[in-house]
């Protein structure tokens, strides 16, 4: 990963590295001061970001974002919401108009986010492209304190504990039926499926940066046993925990 460079990365070379068709017009997004634009690879790592995103992240250069993921910049619960939508786009399902809170320097900003799959010249999906447009103040004021936002925060804070829909709904002050319905509408999956994906994603850092046994990591992240963890991990990331550790470990 290239960091600390004094020169800016070349957009065309970044796109070619993904096998995507070079599109210099993307550089026009640098002229939009409030709109965020980015390109990610199939591992959900940034390969390009417009100037607004670089500055809001408090980075001095695009090189400081390239090769990084959302977990390097956002709280884990929000980072995994972003990751969940990235996976949908990578599967060929666009995410359009997602209302979400994006935090920079501990200050939250509400955006309407759209993510699309990025194809190479053979039409194979090789990454994602996304844009986030700031929402009008009146709309954001009505979204910040919603029960579902409270539920998502609770999931992020307690994901290493046994959780069921009833406990999450109570924490958000919602009925079980309303919580389940609103969650499906917002994230297009059941709360349990989202929680499993969140646990798998969070466990990746432990896999890579520790030598702990896989069974121990499975227990920490509230999986029934190593077999259950391995099966879920493979379903979410397409490989076993051991394979992931071997590929990305130091």
Image (cartoon, rainbow, N blue to C red):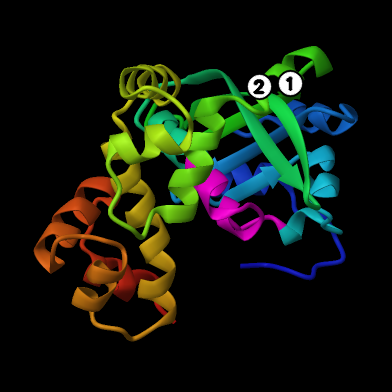
Q: In the shown orientation, is residue 107 left or right of residue 235?
A: right
Determine which residue is flagged by label 1: 140
Q: Which label is found at residue 143? A: 2
Residue at the far left: name it: 227
In the structure shown, which secondary structural element does the residue marked by tag 1 occupy?
A: helix
How far apart marks 2 and 1 lie (CA) works out to 5 Å
Q: Quadrant of the N terminus?
A: bottom right
Q: Which label is found at residue 4? A: none
Q: Quadrant of the C terminus?
A: bottom left
* Image spot of residue 103 (x, y percent): 72, 44
Which residue appears at 74% of the width and 49% of the height? 10
In-front residue for pair 4/7 = 4
* Image spot of residue 155 (x, y percent): 43, 45
Above/below status of 76 relative to 137? below
Which residue appears at 37% of the width and 22% of the height? 175
Which residue appears at 30% of the width and 84% of the height? 212
Q: Quadrant of residue 5?
A: bottom right
Residue 127 in view (yes/no): no
Q: Quadrant of residue 201?
A: bottom left
Residue at the far bottom: name it: 211
Above/below status of 237 relative to 51? below
Q: Residues within 10 Å of mark 2 (few under 14, many from 20)?
A: some
Examine the structure image and report whether residue 73 is included in the region drawn in magenta.
Answer: yes
Q: Which residues are magenta?
A: 65-81
Contact? badges 2 and 1 (CB < 8 Å): yes
Above/below status of 203 relative to 13? below
């Amino acid at each position: 990963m290239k960091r600390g460079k004094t020169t800016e990365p070349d957009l065309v070379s970044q796109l070619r590295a993904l096998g995507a068709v070079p599109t210099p017009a993307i550089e026009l997004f640098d002229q939009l001061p409030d709109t965020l634009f980015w390109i990610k690879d199939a591992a959900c790592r940034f390969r390009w970001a417009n100037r607004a995103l670089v500055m809001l992240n408090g980075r001095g250069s695009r090189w400081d974002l390239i090769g990084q993921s959302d977990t390097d910049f956002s709280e884990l619960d929000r980072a995994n919401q972003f990751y969940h939508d990235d996976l949908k786009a990578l599967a060929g399902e666009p995410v359009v108009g997602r209302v979400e809170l994006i935090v920079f320097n501990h200050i939250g900003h509400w955006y309407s986010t759209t993510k699309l799959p990025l194809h190479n010249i053979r039409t194979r999906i090789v990454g994602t492209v996304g844009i986030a447009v700031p929402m009008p103040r009146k709309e954001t004021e009505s979204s910040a304190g919603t029960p579902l936002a409270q539920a998502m925060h609770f999931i992020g804070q307690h994901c290493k504990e046994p959780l069921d829909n009833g406990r999450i709904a109570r924490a958000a002050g919602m009925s079980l039926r309303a919580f389940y319905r609103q969650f499906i509408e917002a994230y297009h999956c059941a709360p349990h499926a989202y929680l499993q994906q969140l646990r798998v994603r969070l466990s990746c850092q432990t896999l890579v940066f520790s030598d702990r046994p896989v069974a121990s990591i499975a227990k920490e992240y509230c999986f029934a046993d190593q077999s259950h963890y391995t099966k879920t991990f493979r379903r979410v990331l397409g490989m076993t925990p051991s394979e992931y550790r071997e590929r990305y470990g130091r």
